[in-house]
Image: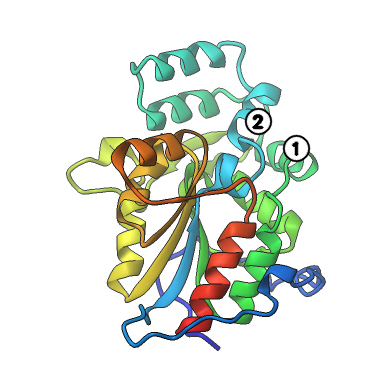
Amino acid sequence: MVGARATLPTTPRRSSPSNTTASVKRSSVTDSLSVANPPDVDRRLPAVLTDFDDTAAAQNVAELLLHRFGHPTWTDVRERFRQGELSLKEYQEITFREMTAGKEAMQTYVRENACFRDHFGELALFCADHSIPMCIVSQGLDFYVQALLDEAGWPDMPVHAVRAEFEDGGRITKYAYDFTYPDAPELGNSKALMVRRFQEQGYHVFFAGDGRSDFEAGEVADTVFAHRQMADMCSDAGIAYTPFTDFGPVLNALCRYVAQI
């Protein structure tokens, strides 16, 4: 056992993990590890934080839902966001308030049409087996993140995302942000703030992301995995990172780290 799980506040947990969790096979990348143990090695316990849309999930699940259930004008709102007229927080709130379907229909669509990136399940199983905290850190909405975790057999994985509150008819009426900077609540949730919270508890944080909103976390995380826009931004800023297209590199690095502490 590596260590106990973090006690950070999480979204309410649901039922115990389903039996599908146990059926995930250990990856060969965890086999035959042989790592030197120098006296000055970082011996902090590891924690794994990952973005959701286009990172943990192979798709941008928010846009998957918008293409299926969004108001016809949602692409106009997206263009305003891309031009810098709206923040990500504003763009998301506007478009999801105008959805033509309720919560249940959207969650069903996610379960049927989205999937996790390769080796995500093996990484989650390795973390569970070694009591390593692993969580989703997202500026997206909790209900669609949870839908995919439930479908994949990881219902108890902590989700730090925007909490969407629904009316009886299934439409979103309110958004709640649980990890914002006090002096910048208009920016919404901060992934860097969540990374720092884990570091303050003594963890070496592994962070994986893909976009502009992930870059601030990459600036402060201990081990960084990046692709797409985040990789370009890290390169421009001189931040060391490992490129990835699936979670094999994350699992490899975590296994090596665990073997040396």
Residue 103 in percent (x, y) is at 65, 40
Which residue lies at the image location 30% right of the left edge and 40% below the top edge? 237
Q: On the image, which quarter does residue 37 sit in?
A: bottom left
Judge by depth and name the residue closer to the eye, 73 or 54.
54
Vertical placement of residue 162 versus 197, above or below:
above
In the structure shown, which secondary structural element does the residue marked by tag 1 occupy? helix
Residue 81 in percent (x, y) is at 41, 20
Residue 4 in percent (x, y) is at 47, 84
Q: On the image, which quarter does residue 249 sit in?
A: bottom right
Residue 56 in percent (x, y) is at 60, 50
Of the numbered discs 2 and 1, the one sitting upstream in the chain is 2
Quadrant (top left, top right, bottom left, bottom right) of the N terminus: bottom right
Q: Which of the labelled discs sits on residue 65, or is there none?
A: 2
Which residue lies at the image location 51% right of the left edge and 79% below the top edge? 258
Residue that numbered label 1 is attached to: 109
Which residue lies at the image location 56% right of the left edge and 11% below the top edge? 73
Vertical placement of residue 226 versus 198, above or below:
above
Inspect the image, locate mark 2, and give the three-letter code of the amino acid beneath it: Leu
Vertical placement of residue 30 versus 98, above or below:
below
Q: CA distance from mark 2 to mark 1?
A: 8 Å
In the structure shown, which secondary structural element does the residue marked by tag 2 occupy? helix
